Amino acid sequence: MTVTAPAEDMPAAPAGGRPVLTVSLAAVGWNYRTLRETAPNAEVAAVVKADAYGLGLAPIAGKLKSAGCNTFFVATLDEGFALRALVGGTPRIFVLNGLAPGAAPAFASYNLAPVLNSLAEIREWADFGRRPAALQIDTGMSRAGLSPDELSALAADAALLARLDLALILSHLAHGDEAASSANAAQRRRFRDALARLPAAPASLAASGGIFLGPEYHFDLVRPGIALYGGNPLAAGESPVRPAVTLTAEILGLRTIARGETAGYGGTFIAARDTLLAVCNIGYADGLPRALSNKGIAYLGGTPCPYAGRVSMDLLTLDVTAAPESERQRGATVEIIGPGMPLEELARRADTVNYEILTGLGARFTRLVLDSHWSRVV
Ligand SMILES: *Cc1c(COP(=O)(O)O)cnc(C)c1O
């Protein structure tokens, strides 16, 4: 269920027993503008793969398009189809995972441009006709893109190059979130060398983290994803962007257990004193990592409440003993992600990253998409 709430309302959990995910489009717009100011001489594209990192492709693409974004990246052809239907014919759409065998006609019919990641893809695309595509060079990820040998073969093949319409040449940093890593400068050097061996084309190296490495990483176009969605793109230090997501759950019921009693599967929580437990309507089927068992903290009012025992599929048990009695009530809202428990802190406690939490967010939430300033949250 998706509800678009009116301006300024901080949503109350609607009845129905679902956790509530709120997405602030205002924050996404603010983040897009911040990235533009940080890379003023480059075009700022948007990476909206994986349903806009779990926030919802339709509202996010609409917001970014109205903020002036004219180039989008998705991971797969299907995501490209969906995005083309949402943004209309004008914006450029690049498909990062490249050209699957036989897929060229489908790309062309939706006016999608593949990111060509190998010589085989390059030849197949060129055989189909001279149409715009991006070319990815691997400068240190050992993932997608031309290897050094493939780059040499392409650079030496003038006939093949003449059959390509290179709309963009890109590469991807392995340490873009680590300002101090010397690997970044090494990749930038390899990227410059590659560009010098290829026909002139617009170039792109930086994703979210790379944008904050400085102007020498910006080239002609930058490709942020996580920073648009309010995830801190820097491994260390204060976030330059605003959170765009909150997640709340609801207390379904309360019970007291005595010292020595256990809670949850496996009995991994053992009460050290008489303990008040609150059972909440969220679990790992909603994308709340089971790794948070006995490690997560939720907020009830202003009180931190530890996860008690294992996270189960549909339910989460909290130790709410420390919360004021007025707060620990059936139907009360608990904050899972928000000002008390930022996305990055939740991810750290789950031994993962903000990207995985966002893209894992489930389909069972009530989703509130807000397009105004969210003063109580941001
Ligand atoms: C996912 C991805 C991005 C966006 O990365 P963020 O770290 O989310 O900004 C950019 N470029 C490529 C090649 C990607 O795979």
Image (cartoon, rainbow, N blue to C red):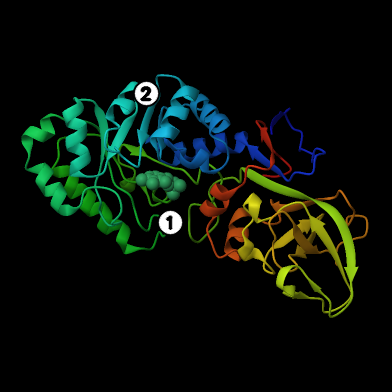
As shown in the figure, which amino acid type bears the numbered disc 2?
A: Tyr
Q: Are marks 2 and 1 in contact (CB under 8 Å)?
A: no
Instruction: Note whether 88 is above or below 117 in the view shown.
Output: above
Instruction: Note whether 22 is above or below 163 in the view shown.
Output: below
- Residue 258 in the image: state x and y as whole percent: 89, 76
- Residue 151 in the image: state x and y as whole percent: 15, 47
Front residue of 266/308: it is: 266
Give how far apart the Cα atoms at labels 2 and 1 are.
34 Å
> Dividing the image into 4 quarters, which one contains the C terminus?
top right
- Residue 109: give its label: none
Q: Is residue 69 visible?
A: no
Front residue of 291/65: it is: 291
* Residue 347 image-quadrant placement: bottom right
- The disc, 2 or 1, on the residue closer to the chain's N-terminal end is 2
As shown in the figure, which amino acid type bears the numbered disc 1?
A: Asp
The residue indicated by pointer 1 is 177
The residue under the point 82% across, 39% down is 15
Does residue 202 appear to the left or right of 14 in the view shown? left
The residue under the point 76% across, 57% down is 299
